[in-house]
Image (cartoon, coloured by chain):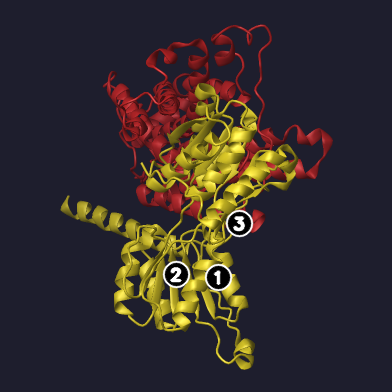
Chain colours: A yellow, B red
Amino acid sequence: MHTRISQRLILVLLTILLVGCAQVATPATPPAVEEQAAAQADAQEVESPPSIALVLIGPKDDNSWAEAAYNALQVQAERGARTAYSESVADADVARVMRGYAEDGFDIIIAHSFSYQDAVFEVAEEYPNVNFAWAGGINRTAPNVADYDQPFYEPSYLVGILAGHLSQTGSLGALYGFNIPVCHAMGEAMLAGAKTVNPDATLTTTAVGSWGDVSAAKEAALAQVDTAGVDFFLGCGEGPTLGSIEAAREAGAYATGYVGDMSRLAPDVVLSSIVWNMTPIFQAISDATAAGAFDGPFYRFGVAEGALDVVINPNLADRVPAEAIEALEAARQAIVAGDLEVPFIPE
Amino acid sequence: MADWSSLLTLAFLTTLLISGIRLAIPIFLAALGEIITERGGVLNLGLEGIMLVGALAGFMTAYAVEQSATPWLVGLAPWLGLAAGLLAGALMGLIMAVFAVSLQTDQVVTGIMLVILGQGITTYVYRQQFGSLTARVTTMPSMPIPGFAELPLVGPIFFNLDPVTYGSLFLLLASLFFLYQTTWGLNIRAVGEHPGAAETSGVNVAVVRYAAVLLGAALTGLGGAVLTVAQLGIFNEGITAGRGWIAVALVIFARWRPERAFAGAFLFGIATALQFRIQALNLGAIPYELLLMLPYVLTLLVLLRGDSRSTAPAALGKAYVKE
C-alpha cells in the first residue's frame, strides 16, 4: 500500500514538473530570443546606444500591452542599439531569463509586467551594473531599478468626452478584470470626461473576475445593457475589452480599444482606442544609462508626455460631431499645458 | 440607485435566464461527455485541452468556409464548425484512449498531458494561421419557433433560442436513453463498474472503453466549438478560461448523472448571470468578490444535497488488465 502511495506521489510531482516545463517549452510561446545587432551602425557612429533586453508576459503582437513595449524596443533597434526580447515568459521563469540577459552583457533589462516585481528586484541586486525597469506604477524603485507608471485614466477622460457626445442613453459601462485601482480610475475618469458634456451621464461598473474570459465578459457587458441601458463601453484588461466589443456588436453600442488600436477587430463598433507609446519611456531610460546618470527613477509619462493618447477609428470618424473633436482636442491641450488635471479616483 | 425590486420585472427575468442558458451550454456539453467517459471507467481530466482544440477547430472550419464564399456552403459554416469541433474532440479522445486503454498509463497524468497539449497546440496553430486578433466568423442566429416565440417570458426563454440550445436539450434526453435503455449504454456502465464481469459475459472491454472515451471527448470538443462558433464568433488564446475544469468538478457533484449535470450547469449559468446583474445594478453593500463566488458556492451547495446512493463507477480510473 505504501509503495502505491509513494508511486502516486512521484507521478504527481512529475506532473507538476511537466506542467512547469511545458509552460517554458510550449511550441506556440517560445521564449524566442531574437537579436538585432546593428554592427554596421557601430562602424559609423562614434558610440552605439545602450543595449536593451525586453521580457514580455504575452505575445509580442497582442494588439495591446506587450505590443506597446515591443514597438518601443524596435525604435531602439532602429537607433542602432543591440536589442533582444522574450515572449510569454511566466512569472516563475522571469528571473532565469533576466539573469541570462545580464550575463549576456545587456545594459538595460525591462520587465514589462507588474507580476515580475519580486524577480526584478532579486536579479537587480545580483547585477548592480545593469539597469532595470519594471511596469509597477506604484513608485517602487531601487538604485538600479526604475518603475514606470501607466496612467490609463488620463486618456480614459478623453474617451469620456467622446462618450458624452455619442452615448444616446448617457449610460456608460466599464468592465474590469478585477476592481483594482488602475481599472477603477479609468472608469471614473471616463465618467468625469462625459460629465463635461452631459452632466446627467452615469457609470455602471462590473468586475468580470478574470482578465482572459471573453465569454463571461460578454455576458457581463450584456447584463449592463439589459439593466442599465449602457450603450458605450470601456474595458480594462484584454478579456473584458474583447467581451465588451462582442457585446457592443450585438447591442448596437460603442466600445473602446484597450492599450492598442483595436478598430480592425470590429470596425463598426470600436469608436476609439487608448494607445500607449512607450518610446518616451525607453528613450529616457536609454539616455540616462548612456549618460551614466541612471538612479532608479519613477517615470510618470501620460498624455502630457505624449505616451498616452486616444485614436478615433477612421471608419467611424464621420459619426463623431465636430464639437466632440474640438472638445477632445481642447482637453488634450489643457492636459499638455498643465491647465487640466484628470481626477484620479483609484477606489 | 436601483433597488432589489428591479430584480422581479419580466424583462429582467427573461434576459437573466437567456444569459444563464448561454453560459451553461458549453459547460453542460463538456460535463455530459465526461459522464459518458467516466461511466465507462476512464477518468479523462483533459477536458480543458479538448475544449480548446474543439473551439479552434470549429472556428477555423467556419472561417475557412466563410472565406471560400461558396454561396450554398456559407450558410452552413456554423454547422460545419460544430461538426469540426466534434471531430477534433474525438481525435483528442483517441489519444486519451490509446494511452489509457491500450497502453494502460496513469489516467490522471495522461489527462493533464491532454490539457497541456491542447493549450500549446491551439496557441501555436492560431498564431501561425491568424497572427494577431482580427479574424471573426458569423455566429448562429436564434431560431424562433412560430406561434410560441411571441409569448411573454416563456416565449423568449423556451421558443427563441439558438439551435445549439435545442440541440443540447436533445442530447440530454438522448444520453439518458442511451445510457439507461440501450445495450451499448449498459455495456459502458458495466465496464465502468466491473470490467472483469463484463468481459466474462462477452463484452469487449477495450472496444467499449474506446467508444466511451471518443464519444465523451467528441461532446467536450462540441462544447468548445459552441463557445467560438455559436456564441462569440472569435477565438482567443485560452478562450475556454477554465470551463473544462468546472465541467470535471460538475461531473462529481452531479454524481455521474446527465440530468443532474444539466441542472448544475444551468444553475451555475444563472448564478453567474445574476451576479453580473447585481453588480451592474449596484445594489449596495455586497462586495463584488462575494458576488463572483456566488455561482460556485450555490452550485456546490445545491448539488451536495440529495441522492447519495449513486456514486462513482467502481472501476473509475483503473486500467483493465485481461487475465
> Which chain is home to disc 2?
A
Establish if B110 lies above or below A68: above
Mark 1 touches mark 2? (CB < 8 Å): yes
Residue closest to the far right:
B71
- Residue at 52%, 60% (x, y): give it: A66
Establish if B278 lies above or below A185: above
Question: What residue is disc 2 on?
Answer: A110
Report the disc number at residue A73: 1
> Which chain is home to disc 3?
B
Crowding near the residue tagged with mark 1, few <14, some 14–19, many ≥20 C-alpha atoms within 10 Å: many
- Residue at 55%, 57% (x, y): give it: A336
Q: Position of residue A222 (x, y in %)?
A: 54, 29
Question: What residue is disc 3 on?
Answer: B127
Which amino acid is tagged 2?
Ile
Which amino acid is tagged 3?
Arg
* CA–CA distance in space, label 3 to label 1: 21 Å
Crowding near the residue tagged with mark 2, few <14, some 14–19, many ≥20 C-alpha atoms within 10 Å: many
Same chain for mark 3 and mark 1? The answer is no
Which amino acid is tagged 1?
Leu
Q: Position of residue B126 (x, y in %)?
A: 60, 53
Position of the C terminus of chain A, as image quadrant, is: top left
**Dot 1: element:** helix
* CA–CA distance in space, label 1 to label 2: 10 Å
